[in-house]
Image: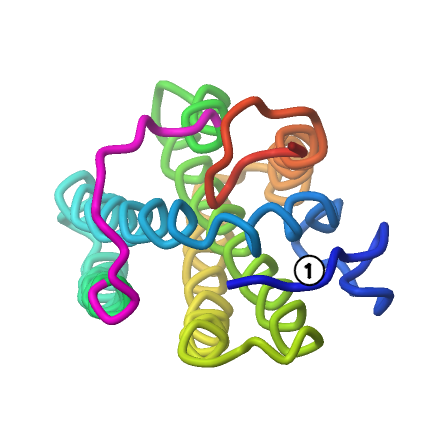
């Protein structure tokens, strides 16, 4: 998977709008590296899909008394596992050899901000999930555009477009649940979203030594 180098602030000279939940667009240098290192990108994203399913299942156990939450997380977990199967199927088609990758800093650093006690913890976990899914959505859009402009879409571009549409739904699920939990507990929702969004933007725009699907600037 190769594409022409994107221009600053966009992809191949075409500017992109920032996702409504995010404070910064993915740096063009990350898009260029992702296009050049498609094997690592696919392997890491397969891991991301497994982790996303695991997170949804963990939330079902943590908040088992909330049937709306568990129902929505159950559906989300199933979809994330289907995405994992789609990614691994494409890896086989492209002869990408699976390998163990050390996790990047992104999710772990975001979760450091999550409150330790309830009801704040539930709100924070849902906001954290919303931001991760929103960033995935934004990155799939950037990658699909880069590949289309380079006339190199093929099966990877089709997969990324499909995953983009799914992530757009997923971030709304988490955001709705976060707002619901905040309203129930009388917690300032917008302020807490801002706290996480600021940190998320810093992680995406600052230098990162490790290339991953959610890594920062190369």
Q: Which residue is mark 1?
A: 19
Q: Is residue 102 above or below residue 63?
A: above
Q: Which residues are magenta?
A: 92-105
Q: x, y percentage for residue 180?
A: 45, 55
State left or right for residue 8 relative to residue 89: right
Q: x, y percentage for residue 134?
A: 55, 56
Q: x, y percentage for residue 42?
A: 36, 54
Q: What residue do we see at 51% from left, 53% from top? A: 179
Q: What residue do we see at 47% from left, 25% from top? A: 105
Q: What residue do we see at 75% from left, 45% from top? A: 24
State left or right for residue 75 relative to residue 38: left
State left or right for residue 90 relative to residue 159: left
On whether residue 104 falls in the magenta region, the answer is: yes
Q: Is residue 166 above or below residue 31?
A: below
Q: What residue do we see at 69% from left, 60% from top? A: 19
On whether residue 81 falls in the magenta region, the answer is: no
Classify mark 1: helix, strand or loop. Answer: loop
Count the labels in the image: 1
Q: Is residue 202 above or below residue 74?
A: above
**Label 1 crowd bin: few (<14), some (14–19), many (20+), radius 10 Å:** some
Q: x, y percentage for residue 27?
A: 73, 45
The answer to which quarter of the image holds residue 115 is top left
Most foreground residue, 108 or 98: 98
């Amino acid at each position: 998977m190769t594409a022409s180098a994107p221009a600053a602030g966009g992809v191949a000279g075409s500017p992109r709008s920032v996702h409504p939940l995010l404070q910064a667009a993915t740096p063009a240098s990350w898009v260029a590296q992702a296009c050049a290192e498609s094997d690592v990108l696919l392997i890491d994203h397969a891991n991301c899909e497994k982790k996303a399913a695991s997170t949804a299942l963990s939330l079902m156990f943590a908040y088992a008394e909330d049937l709306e939450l568990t129902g929505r997380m159950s559906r989300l977990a199933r979809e994330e596992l289907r995405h994992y199967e789609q990614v691994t199927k494409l890896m086989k088609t492209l002869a990408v050899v699976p390998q163990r990758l050390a996790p990047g800093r992104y999710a772990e650093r975001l979760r450091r901000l999550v409150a330790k006690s309830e009801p704040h913890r539930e709100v924070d976990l849902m906001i954290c999930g919303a931001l991760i899914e929103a960033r995935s959505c934004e990155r799939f859009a950037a990658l699909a555009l880069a590949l289309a402009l380079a006339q190199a879409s093929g099966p990877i571009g089709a997969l990324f477009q499909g995953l983009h549409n799914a992530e757009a739904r997923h971030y709304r699920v988490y955001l709705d649940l976060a707002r619901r939990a905040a309203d129930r507990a009388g917690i300032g929702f917008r302020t807490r979203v801002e706290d996480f969004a600021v940190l998320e933007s810093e992680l995406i725009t600052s230098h990162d030594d490790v290339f991953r699907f959610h890594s920062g600037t190369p």
